Image: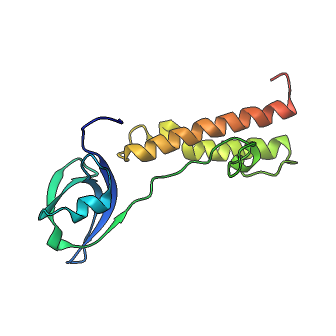
């Protein structure tokens, strides 16, 4: 939230000097910048694992820290450059048959349906991504289906 004094977290993969890798979130303060957090004149970095446990990692034990890129979902808007059309989102040609489009829709729904992730212990970002994709897939299918049956 902008204007908030709550510390921000950034998802990272940290390789320690012993070769082990820790994945989770580093508390980046109110700036939200990884570089500033790592360059602070303090001996430890606050770390939150994906399981919610907090720890402090000695900077001297960090061999490398890589930010984890957030998952990006395709944007469904055929008029915007760099966005996906309904057909691209479903992975079918524009001249595809109704059955091809329906099969592609069902294949994707089986991958992204929110019920599949309801009981899974996944990061919120992954669940949000799957939910957003499901919504876009459903919208794309609705638009393509309309092309075949305008009354539907």
**How many numbered marks does the figure carry?**
0
Q: Nearer the viewer, residue 77 or 133?
A: 77
Q: Considering the image in quadrants, where does the N terminus appear? A: top left
Extreme bottom residue here?
Answer: 18
Q: Considering the image in quadrants, where does the C terminus appear? A: top right
Quadrant for residue 35, please give it.
Answer: bottom left
Compared with 60, 69 (above or below) is above
Residue at point 24% right, 39% down? 6
- Render colour scheme: rainbow
Q: Nearer the viewer, residue 42 or 152?
A: 42
Measuring from the top left, give residue 27's x and y in whole percent: 24, 51
Residue at point 38% right, 43% down? 124
Compared with 118, 59 (above or below) is below
Residue at point 86% right, 45% down? 97
Q: Left or right? Give the position of 118 relative to 99.
A: left
Compared with 76, 64 (above or below) is below
Measuring from the top left, give residue 118's x and y in whole percent: 42, 37
Measuring from the top left, give residue 36's x and y in whole percent: 27, 60
Residue at point 76% right, 33% down? 143
Extreme left residue here?
Answer: 43
Q: Nearer the viewer, residue 87 or 38?
A: 38
Compared with 44, 29 (above or below) is above
Quadrant for residue 110, please give it.
Answer: top right
Q: Left or right? Give the position of 106 relative to 49.
A: right
Measuring from the top left, give residue 60's x and y in whole percent: 15, 73
Q: Left or right? Give the position of 128 relative to 144.
A: left
């Amino acid at each position: 939230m902008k204007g908030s004094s709550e510390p921000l977290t950034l998802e990272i993969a940290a390789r320690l000097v012993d070769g082990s890798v820790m994945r989770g979130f580093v508390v980046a303060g109110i700036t939200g910048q990884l570089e500033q957090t790592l360059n602070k004149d303090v001996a430890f970095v606050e770390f939150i694992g994906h399981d919610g446990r907090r720890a402090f990692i000695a900077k001297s034990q960090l061999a490398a820290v890589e930010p984890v890129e957030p998952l990006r979902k395709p944007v469904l808007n055929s008029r915007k450059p760099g966005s996906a059309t309904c057909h691209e989102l479903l992975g079918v040609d524009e001249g595809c048959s109704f059955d091809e489009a329906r099969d592609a829709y069902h294949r994707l729904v089986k991958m992204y349906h929110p019920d599949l992730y309801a009981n899974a212990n996944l990061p919120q970002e992954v669940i949000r991504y799957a939910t957003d994709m499901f919504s876009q897939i459903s919208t794309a299918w609705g638009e393509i289906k309309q092309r075949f049956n305008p009354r539907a």
